[in-house]
Amino acid sequence: GIQVEQSPPDLILQEGANSTLRCNFSDSVNNLQWFHQNPWGQLINLFYIPSGTKQNGRLSATTVATERYSLLYISSSQTTDSGVYFCAAHSGGGADGLTFGKGTHLIIQP
Amino acid sequence: NAGVMQNPRHLVRRRGQEARLRCSPMKGHSHVYWYRQLPEEGLKFMVYLQKENIIDESGMPKERFSAEFPKEGPSILRIQQVVRGDSAAYFCASSHQRQVNEQFFGPGTRLTVL
């Protein structure tokens, strides 16, 4: 099945800083999603982005499907951005569910 | 426009008991997925169901675990004779169509086995 790798595994930033999180995947995808798992454990949908670029406020994402990677950008970080960011993907074959990366643990310090 | 609903949010069971986790998909969604989050393993797919059918259970443990999505009512993930290793967060997701559509996740059920 598809492999999903995220980097960096941990990231500590000061409030106001910008960050880029990366997701590499091993096969062509028909579904790629970014999630934020907040300190209460809830998975919040950020982007559904199998290809192209999207923006939502301070967050944006780009997936370059031909090169098998996706990037999540967070600008002007706030303490509420802290948590774990997951990338998850599905390719045409294999199991029907999403394959998750191990996540990037982001800590925004005031 | 309610999202994916899961209950209970927290469930405590003693070893050997049964756990039943419920999931109601988003309105208009007929595809349901169950995932498990273990501390050392991350989020893993377990099973994919449509109404009255199990489509893909390749991620489900072979014993003690079962899932259903009846014509009426929520999807149920059932764990029989729970063991301490079953302690985890169990998430349900739903989508409008198979695979290629965005999956939306519920708040999860946190199972603790004493």
Image: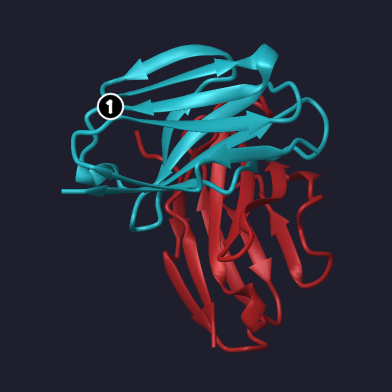
Chain colours: A cyan, B red
The one of B68 and A49 positioned closer to us in this rendering:
A49
Q: Name the residue under label 1.
A: A75
- Up-down: is A3 above or below A64? below
Quadrant housing the N terminus of chain B = top left
- Up-down: is B9 above or below B98? below
- Amino acid carrying label 1: it is Ser
The one of B101 and A26 positioned closer to us in this rendering:
A26
- Up-down: is B1 above or below A61? below
| Circle 1 chain | A
Q: How many labels does the image show?
A: 1
Is residue B96 in sight in this rendering? no
Quadrant housing the C terminus of chain B = bottom right
| Rendered location of residue A49, percent (x, y) | 53, 20
The one of B52 and B101 positioned closer to us in this rendering:
B101
Q: In this view, does A4 lie to the left or right of B2?
A: right
Q: Identify the element where label 1 is drawn.
A: loop
Is residue B14 in sight in this rendering? yes
| Rendered location of residue A29, percent (x, y) | 69, 23
Res A74 → quadrant: top left
Q: What residue is rendered at 58% in x and 14% in y?
A: A51
